[in-house]
Amino acid sequence: SQQGEEDPQALSIQEGENATMNCSYKTSINNLQWYRQNSGRGLVHLILIRSNEREKHSGRLRVTLDTSKKSSSLLITASRAADTASYFCATDGMDSSYKLIFGSGTRLLVRP
Amino acid sequence: ETGVTQTPRHLVMGMTNKKSLKCEQHLGHNAMYWYKQSAKKPLELMFVYSLEERVENNSVPSRFSPECPNSSHLFLHLHTLQPEDSALYLCASSQDWGLRGIGTDTQYFGPGTRLTVL
């Protein structure tokens, strides 16, 4: 069953603007991860945030996690054309299986 | 480069062919994964190997047969595929499959093999 669901499905912004993507999930988790995928390529890990963390930063990326709402957001500040990609959240369940369940992703287009 | 390589990058095969996808990781990881990414569908986990032992088979049809001869190499053997099996097949690795109380590990993906079944 699908665990993470990103919103919006597609986002188009101007270079220099901020981009915010949201992820909602259904069951309790150990951690939540965000990945990026350039068209037709492999995924690249961006950030892992644990269930006991509320916010994490990495360069221009900021991830928040609200376990009470079962949601997370990824903020990219001062976007660049090179940020154009699909962004996926992935969650695991707190059962004994460590499967990562990916959402359908947000396609981000940053216009130069 | 993520340290995970996949060959071939593109593959076109007929429904009666037998082919193999290869994945190699140079990261010293203990877990390796096969994922399938179809158009308009979320990434689907197919198989997981931890310390060369298969720990997860996500209800994958038998026409897909994985093989993990050692912790650095992972193969996906394909035979009598269907056109709906056309997809991007991604290999990934992580330090460990998962740790109790901590959860899943960061996964490092290869560039994928674009498979077309005619």
Image: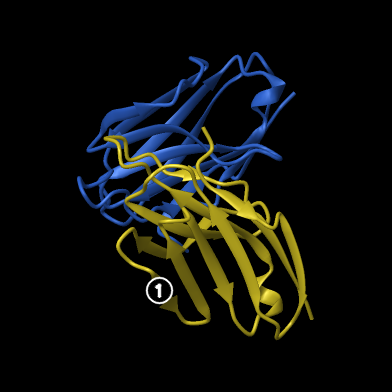
Task: Locate the C terminus of chain A and report the quarter of the image it occupies.
Answer: bottom right
Q: In this view, does B71 lie above or below B85?
A: below
Residue at position x 20%, y 45% in the image: B100
Residue at position x 68%, y 56% in the image: A39
Where is residue A92 shown, x and y percent of the image?
A: 38, 45
For disc 1, the marked residue is: A56
> Which chain is assigned yellow?
A
Residue at position x 26%, y 37% in the image: B50
Residue sitting nearer the eye, A1 or B113: A1
Q: Circle 1 sits in a helix, a strand or a loop, which is it?
A: strand
Chain under disc 1: A
Residue sitting nearer the eye, B118 or A88: A88
Where is residue A14 shown, x and y percent of the image?
A: 78, 79
Q: How is the image coloured?
A: by chain
Where is residue B92 shown, x and y percent of the image?
A: 42, 47
Q: What residue type is labelled 1?
A: Lys
Residue sitting nearer the eye, A90 or B94: A90
Chain B on-screen colour: blue
